[in-house]
Image (tube, helix red, strand yellow):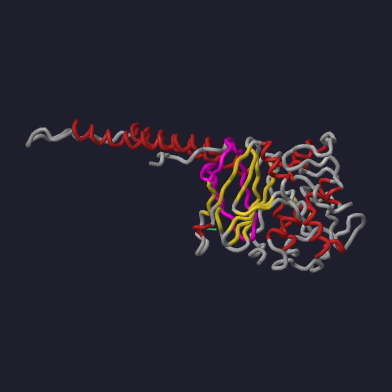
């Protein structure tokens, strides 16, 4: 006989936090229901008709009573809101030191890629005790990334990035599901999250990534698709200089300012006219909609992020992971000193650069609104 569990195992900090709220709500619901039903039974007995000719005394309403039983439950219910909202905001704001992992949903599989280039399908390996941020995109339809043991579920929607973060607390293997009906093999779109001890995770992480880091693959794409002919690094090209751009505030030609985050980079690649940087013209850059798939866009984003790091952008090396292993001698992606691997271990024995911490504060700023107009994402 399988063991009976009311809830799946709780293997993330978020899981316990949500469980407390869940038990609290269940507790209040049970208490309220009990109060109502006990009241019904008590009054039914207390005020029953005692004889055929019994005429009860007329009772007029009581404002005090009515206001009390309206306001008190209202205040109690409001605690659901505030507690839930607090958890929601925490869930929306990954800590600055979170490790980045990219997830692309596709009929019918989950494709996972680490900044150092390691890829896997329907598997997600994470270290225990370290915040992990997932940046998720869809190649085709809406999927939903669901890890019951972490009490986390988020839709993965074509045309935008959705994020999810967690800190796993217990080593083990946990089920991973697609929780949005996405076609015939939706039910097969399942996999496993493996939570490992940090040391084991590091060993696992360095064992793969033969194709080079995401940033170095992004750099190849940057050359291959001719981006480098207009986006010059040392002088003014026909398109904005991307060095140090990621994470900064960008002034647009219409006077608005946006934060150059993943969503902004993605939109600028797939719909270049959506936001024109001040001082540049429309229709210079072609769209890469349908040319690049979501994974390639993510690789380019990693590359552009690595350009920001070379002058101490808002993201620390720790977040974007190693740029070693790319095998691209002299690549700009590899130029940043003191690179950390995705596990946070210094690979070059250089002390962490102090400005990385100072700049990390920028990460607490709210992300720019996600582009709703960015189209349906790359095709494959
Ligand atoms: Cu993907 Cu259901």
Relative side of 351 to 37, left or right: right
Image-quadrant location for residue 312: top right
- Ligand 1's image quarter is bottom right
Residue 274 visible within the image: yes
Name the spot of residue 348 as percent of width and height, x first.
84, 38
Relative side of 125 to 297, left or right: left
Using the image as rendered, state which of residue 64 and residue 96 is in the foreground. 96
For the point 73% across and 49% down, the residue is: 115
Name the spot of residue 6 as percent of width and height, x first.
42, 39
Q: Quadrant of the C terminus?
A: bottom right
For the point 49% across and 37% down, the residue is: 19
- Which region is colored magenta? 145-174
For the point 51% across and 62% down, the residue is: 185
Based on the picture, tell me whether residue 146 belongs to the magenta stretch: yes
Count up the numbered dots: 0
Name the spot of residue 282 as percent of width and height, x first.
79, 66
- Residue found farthest to the left: 52
Using the image as rendered, state which of residue 22 and residue 52 is in the foreground. 22
Using the image as rendered, state which of residue 327 and residue 100 is in the foreground. 327
Based on the picture, tell me whether residue 148 belongs to the magenta stretch: yes
Using the image as rendered, state which of residue 255 and residue 328 is in the foreground. 328
Name the spot of residue 62 as percent of width and height, x first.
30, 33
Q: Is residue 92 above or below residue 38?
A: below
Q: Quadrant of the N terminus?
A: top left
Residue 257 visible within the image: no
């Amino acid at each position: 006989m399988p063991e009976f569990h009311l809830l799946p195992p709780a293997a993330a900090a978020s899981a316990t936090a949500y469980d407390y709220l869940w038990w609290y709500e269940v507790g209040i619901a049970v208490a309220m229901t009990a109060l109502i039903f006990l009241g019904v039974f008590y009054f039914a007995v207390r005020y029953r008709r005692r004889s055929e000719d019994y005429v009860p005394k007329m009772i007029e309403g009581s404002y005090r009573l009515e206001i009390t039983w309206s306001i008190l439950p209202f205040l109690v219910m409001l605690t659901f809101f505030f507690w839930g909202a607090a958890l929601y905001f925490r869930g929306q704001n990954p800590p600055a030191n979170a490790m980045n992992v990219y997830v692309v949903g596709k009929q019918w599989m989950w494709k996972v890629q680490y900044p150092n280039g390691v890829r896997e399908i329907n598997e997600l390996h994470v270290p225990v005790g370290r915040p992990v941020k997932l940046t998720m995109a869809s190649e085709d339809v809406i999927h939903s990334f669901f890890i019951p043991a972490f009490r986390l579920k988020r839709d993965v929607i074509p045309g935008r990035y959705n994020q999810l973060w967690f800190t796993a607390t217990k080593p083990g293997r946990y089920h991973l599901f697609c929780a949005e009906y996405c076609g015939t093999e939706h039910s097969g779109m399942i996999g496993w999250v493996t939570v490992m001890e940090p040391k084991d995770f590091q060993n696992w992480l360095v064992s793969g990534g033969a194709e080079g880091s995401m940033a170095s693959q992004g750099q190849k794409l940057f050359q291959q698709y001719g981006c480098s002919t207009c986006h010059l690094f040392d002088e003014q090209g026909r398109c904005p200089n991307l060095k140090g751009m990621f994470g900064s505030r960008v002034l647009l030609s219409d006077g608005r300012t946006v934060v150059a985050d993943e969503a902004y980079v993605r939109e600028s690649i797939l719909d270049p006219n959506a936001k024109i940087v001040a001082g540049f013209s429309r229709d210079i850059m072609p769209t890469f909609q349908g040319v690049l798939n979501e994974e390639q866009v993510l690789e380019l984003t990693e590359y552009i992020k690595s350009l920001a790091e070379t002058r101490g952008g808002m993201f620390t090396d720790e977040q974007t992971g190693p740029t070693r292993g790319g095998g691209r001698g002299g690549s700009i992606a590899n130029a940043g000193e003191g690179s950390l691997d995705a596990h946070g271990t210094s690979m070059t024995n250089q002390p962490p650069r102090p400005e990385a911490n100072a700049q990390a504060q920028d990460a607490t700023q709210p992300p720019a609104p996600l582009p709703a107009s960015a189209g349906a994402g790359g095709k494959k």
